[in-house]
Image (spheres, coloured by chain):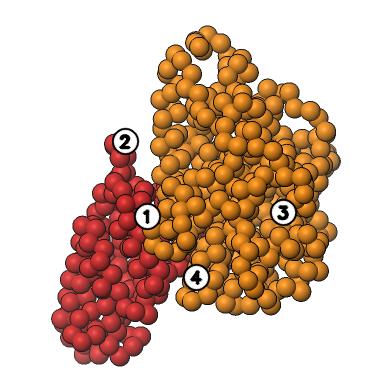
Chain colours: A orange, B red
């Protein structure tokens, strides 16, 4: 098929076929696709911006991105959390250039326009002289504000004023986020680790949503070194297409005496989870997923660290930085009331496995970079290179699994990947059902 | 009347400084040459190897070094695991390996903390290239090493590296700092 002289939307409509597991390579790193993604995905859907534990104090703020746009996530003096475009209403200068702080107002470094931490314009120097006789209209110059809401401590924002609520957007994924982020009061320890990877943002996102299969090859060192029983350590468990482009995989065990999680936290887990969720938690040995479009989360496969079986929870966003570059923002998340051994060993385990230096992460970045480079080259071909996303195409979802979504037995499936691409395509073409 | 030609009492002897500098330069060569097993032998059993994250803060608004968030949080056991991984045929991120060149300088010395220990601060420039893009990554940071004399040989008891980027410009830290 030739794609010369047709526009990118026509090309996407003609070539992306999620239901049959066919995705063209060019979409991985195409500048026109990327422009559509910024406008129709990052400009519209709910995006993760911060965790509530980062904003406990009144006036606390962090600076994050929604797509490529800088935003301030702030707890105002009235205790409410809001998200503002990090842009002065006078000339668009960034109101703050630091990562975090505590402030009752932001004063633009350019001309001094000043905005309260709840978004209202407060004034500017020599205002009545500069704008006689009464100064500027307070209401007209309020900071540009995104819709903001949170679920289980995870704060999201969207520029879409009309679309679904956060609860609706997360849909069936909530049941699983309860287990990951809501089983206890959680906190992020420290700043995000951040680094630039020369890869398209979507590749790691869909990997976390849908790809347990790569662990048998890309991460086979784990078995080589005897830390797991075999290279298929990623297979046993469940693959979940949670709808809305959200996906996850859960590795389970049936070991006696059961839960790998600290007994010290069991009461808190029990108080916050349903019986079904708690029973599943007790079997978890790894847990990975992605909230559409770019919030990934992970409970790495438990391994022994200094003589004790531990894991280290990771929260990760893949921030777009162009069609072929991303910023990884990665946090260690842990139960606030956890015993010290769980926090300390967990952090060590997280850093050593999944982080800028992580032994798993390194091999992943290697792959995503090379895929991106190949995709850039594919753009110049006159025929489409179609990629295969058919794993588990004929599998039937389980009927008796207690959690929602389409749940498959065994993690070797690409069902959630196909679902990811359906949501992605519908958004890019403006064909999604408005719920 | 004092003279700059007379060493103050707390100064580290020129011989000790020279031994420490020679040791660190030889250690960097082992890493550049990817002689990881020999490198491991230089690490003390109680090694502490930490690389904190950095953040962008305004002057007066707290430290921009965050010791709670770490790029490396390792000990001898985990470093041994990392080296064992590099020895497998499935360590994709460094196989084929990066070409690296470590340049050390601006050595500063302080006695201790232990009786047989010397603290050395130095600046690290780590050039890294991989593949055929013609690009390279330059990783810069300040090391704080504690070197310990054990049976006539120096060991690395502690290494802290404060990197000079809040957003690292290298796709992974698959190389040792």
Q: Total marks drawn? A: 4
Under circle 4, the secondary element is: strand
What's the mark number on residue A304? Answer: 4
The image quarter containing residue A131 is top right
Q: Position of residue B79 (x, y in %)?
A: 37, 67
Which chain does tag 4 point to? A
User: Callout 1 environment at 10 Å: few (<14), some (14 to 19), or many (20+)?
Assistant: many
Query: Where is mark 2, residue-wise?
Result: B133
- Decide if residue B60 is in sight here: no
Which chain does tag 3 point to? A
User: Callout 3 environment at 10 Å: few (<14), some (14 to 19), or many (20+)?
Assistant: some
Query: Do tag 2 and tag 3 residues touch (Cβ < 8 Å)?
Result: no
| A426 to the left or right of A326 | right
**Which residue is drawn at the image coordinates 47% and 62% (left, top)?**
A228
Q: Position of residue A206 (x, y in %)?
A: 58, 40
Where's the C terminus of chain A, which quadrant?
top right
Query: Do tag 1 and tag 2 residues touch (Cβ < 8 Å)?
Result: no
What's the mark number on residue B174? Answer: 1
The image quarter containing residue B117 is bottom left
The image quarter containing residue A377 is top left
Using the numbered discs, state the Cα–Cα distance from disc 4 to disc 3 in whole angstroms.
25 Å
| A401 to the left or right of B34 | right
**Which residue is drawn at the image coordinates 27% and 78% (left, top)?**
B155
**Which residue is drawn at the image coordinates 26% and 52% (left, top)?**
B100
Query: Where is mark 3, residue-wise?
Result: A177
């Amino acid at each position: 098929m030739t794609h010369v002289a047709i526009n990118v939307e026509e090309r996407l409509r003609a070539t992306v076929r999620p239901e049959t597991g066919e995705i063209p390579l060019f979409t991985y790193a195409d500048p026109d696709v990327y422009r559509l993604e910024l406008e129709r995905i990052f400009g519209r859907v709910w995006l993760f911006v911060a965790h509530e534990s980062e904003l406990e104090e009144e006036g606390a703020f962090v600076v994050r991105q929604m797509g490529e746009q800088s935003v301030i996530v702030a707890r105002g003096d009235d205790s409410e959390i809001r998200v503002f475009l990090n842009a002065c209403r006078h000339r668009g200068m960034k109101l703050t250039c630091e990562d975090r702080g505590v402030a009752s107002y932001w004063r633009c470094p350019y001309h001094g326009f000043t905005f309260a931490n709840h978004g209202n314009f407060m004034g500017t120097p020599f205002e009545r002289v500069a704008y006689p006789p009464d100064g500027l209209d307070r209401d007209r110059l309020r900071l540009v504000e995104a819709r903001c809401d949170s679920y289980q401590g995870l704060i999201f924002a969207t520029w879409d004023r009309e679309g679904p609520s956060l609860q609706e957007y997360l849909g069936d994924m909530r049941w699983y986020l309860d287990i990951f982020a809501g089983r206890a009061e959680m906190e992020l320890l420290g700043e995000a680790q951040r680094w630039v990877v020369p890869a398209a943002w979507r590749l790691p996102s869909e990997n976390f949503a849908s790809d347990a299969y790569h662990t048998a090859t890309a991460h086979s060192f784990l078995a080589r070194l005897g830390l797991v029983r075999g290279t298929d350590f990623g297979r046993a468990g469940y693959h979940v297409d949670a709808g809305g482009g959200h996906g996850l995989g859960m590795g389970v065990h049936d070991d006696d005496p059961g839960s790998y999680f600290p007994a010290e936290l069991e009461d808190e887990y029990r108080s916050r989870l349903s019986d079904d969720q708690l029973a599943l938690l007790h079997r978890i040995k790894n847990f990975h997923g992605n909230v559409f479009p770019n919030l990934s989360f992970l409970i790495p496969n438990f391994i022994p660290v200094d003589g004790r079986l531990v894991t280290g929870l990771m929260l990760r966003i893949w921030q777009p930085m162009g069609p072929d570059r991303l910023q990884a923002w990665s946090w260690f998340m842990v139960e606030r009331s956890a015993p010290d051994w769980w926090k300390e060993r967990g952090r060590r385990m997280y850093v050593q496995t999944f982080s800028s230096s992580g032994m798993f992460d390194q091999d992943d970045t290697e792959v995503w970079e090379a895929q991106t480079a190949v995709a850039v080259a594919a753009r110049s071909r006159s025929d489409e290179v179609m990629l295969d996303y058919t794993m588990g195409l004929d599998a039937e979802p389980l009927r008796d699994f207690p959690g929602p979504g389409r749940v498959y037995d065994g993690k070797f499936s690409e069902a959630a990947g196909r679902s990811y691409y359906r949501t992605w395509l519908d958004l890019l073409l403006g064909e999604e059902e408005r719920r | 009347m004092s003279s700059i030609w007379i060493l103050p009492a707390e100064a580290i002897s020129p011989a000790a400084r020279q031994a420490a500098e020679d040791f660190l330069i030889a250690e960097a060569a082992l890493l550049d040459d990817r002689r990881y097993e020999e490198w491991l032998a230089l690490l003390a059993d109680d090694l502490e190897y930490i690389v904190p994250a950095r953040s962008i803060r305004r002057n007066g608004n707290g430290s921009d070094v965050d010791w709670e968030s770490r790029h490396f949080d390792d000990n001898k056991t985990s470093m041994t695991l990392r080296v064992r991984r590099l020895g497998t045929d499935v360590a994709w991120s460094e196989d084929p390996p990066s070409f690296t060149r470590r340049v050390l300088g601006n050595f500063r010395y302080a006695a201790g903390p232990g009786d047989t220990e010397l603290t050395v601060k130095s600046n690290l420039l780590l050039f890294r290239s991989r593949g055929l893009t013609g690009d390279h990554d330059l990783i810069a940071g300040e090391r704080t090493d504690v070197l310990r004399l054990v049976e006539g040989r120096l060991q690395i008891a502690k290494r802290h590296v404060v990197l000079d980027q809040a957003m690292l410009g290298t796709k992974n830290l698959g190389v040792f700092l």
